[in-house]
Image (cartoon, rainbow, N blue to C red):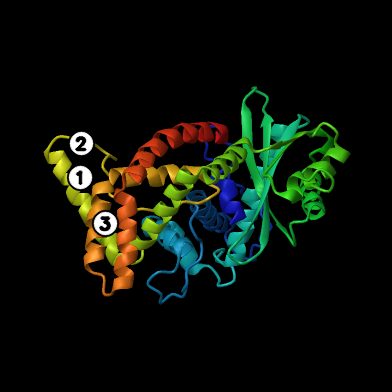
Amino acid sequence: MGFIGLVGSTSNSSEVNVELPTTNVAIPIPKNVDVPNNRLQLKASFFIVRYIAFQAIAFRGNDESFSSLNRGNFFESLGIVTFWNEKVAEIIEKAPKNATYTSPRIQNEILHVFSAKVKKAIQEEIGDAKFCIMVDEARDESMKEQMVVVFRYVDAKDFVKERFFGLIHVVDTAALTLKKGIYSLLSQHCLDIQNIRGQGYDGASNMRGMWNGLQVLILNDCPYAYYIHCFAHRLQLALVKASKQVVPICHFFHTLLFLIKIVNASCKRNEQLKVANANEIAHLIDLEELETGSGLNQIGTLQRPVETCWSSHFRLVSGLLRMFTSTVEVLQNIIDDAIDGEHRAERELAYDGLTSFEFVFILHLEKKTIEITDKLCQALQS
């Protein structure tokens, strides 16, 4: 997964150009075979691996046997290549079983070759110049702590670059463990620690601690590596904290979450909301109150916001404003379908909150307010 993200990060407007390696791959070539054909076969694997990595899709399939209807992205892509190139198909068909260059091990080796070449290109682009590091850690699906490292620097043409450099598995998130991982990564790629001129982390105590935090440990070794708490993250925390201190706003978001809980309780209710929204859009288009065009008037749903991501609050508030009439209609249907007094009372409470003057007023107010802060947040992130 780390390499897929690494390759994907080079698809910006300012790319790191990576050429396909040809003869420098440490893969044994069987004796008594045609070397040009062998290289052509390996080249096909290289192009497929590069394509899948850039598309950020999975390589493997659940069943890669010859009898499988879907052997996974790698083998299905190889099938397309052999379908249109008879020579490659003939070479692969006649190749020894131990020299097909399509096994998971070979795929991983090719990925490591690309990874090494991309990192080398970034290291050469930085050279002896000063740079900043941005670090964050998260737990992946396999319950392992992964630390992501990004470099920010000015290249030879005076353009500011941000390059994702890799993922590092760490046994824990202690500041000393993270420091060792960062130093090891820098030393492996001949990047001088004394050239660090900035540190960008979140506000967790293990990162920004004044006595034992990561920023202090690095600052002790490099006195010019000043720490900056991510401004976008600080804005998010300030907005969340402020919204909880104002009672009407806090009550508004509690009502909003309660409403989402009821509407999104089943697939049936979600489908009812989509149908009602589609009918409302069609009606407004007939009245010429909505513009039509590519990407406009999309049918959506109400999604639960993420507390630390204020942009999700903006999407929720904007979505509810667009689907307000549809949401009221679906909520009325849910009330009518209530099977007992307890469920009916709960749903009527959500309906009364949604249709109250205070809720509608704050909904419009929050739309305008959060729109401003969202633009600021996007600017800080960019």
- Are the residues at dot 1 and dot 2 in contact (C-beta closer than 8 Å)? yes
- Are the residues at dot 3 and dot 2 in contact (C-beta closer than 8 Å)? no
Q: Secondary structure at mark 2?
A: loop
Q: Is residue 164 visible?
A: yes
N-terminal label among 3 and 1: 3
97 shown above or below 127: below
Q: Amino acid at mark 2?
A: Leu
The residue depicted at 52 percent of the width and 40 percent of the height is 11
Residue 380, image quadrant: top right
Q: Amino acid at mark 1?
A: Ile
N-terminal label among 1 and 2: 1
Q: Estimate the x, y position of residue 142 in percent, counting from the top left.
A: 61, 67
Q: 84 or 332, which is in the foreground?
A: 332
Quadrant for the C terminus, please: top right
Q: Is residue 287 left or right of residue 129?
A: left
Residue labelled with disc 3: 273
Q: Estimate the x, y position of residue 354 in percent, counting from the top left.
A: 32, 51
Q: Estimate the x, y position of residue 203 in percent, counting from the top left.
A: 68, 45
The residue depicted at 26 percent of the width and 61 percent of the height is 271
Residue labelled with disc 2: 290
Q: Amino acid at mark 3?
A: Leu
Q: Secondary structure at mark 1?
A: helix
The residue depicted at 53 percent of the width and 31 percent of the height is 379
The Cα–Cα distance between marks 3 and 1, rounded to whole angstroms, is: 12 Å
Q: Residues within 10 Å of mark 3 (few under 14, many from 20)?
A: many
Residue labelled with disc 1: 281
Tell me the tag on residue 360.
none
Q: Estimate the x, y position of residue 289 in percent, counting from the top left.
A: 18, 35
N-terminal label among 3 and 2: 3
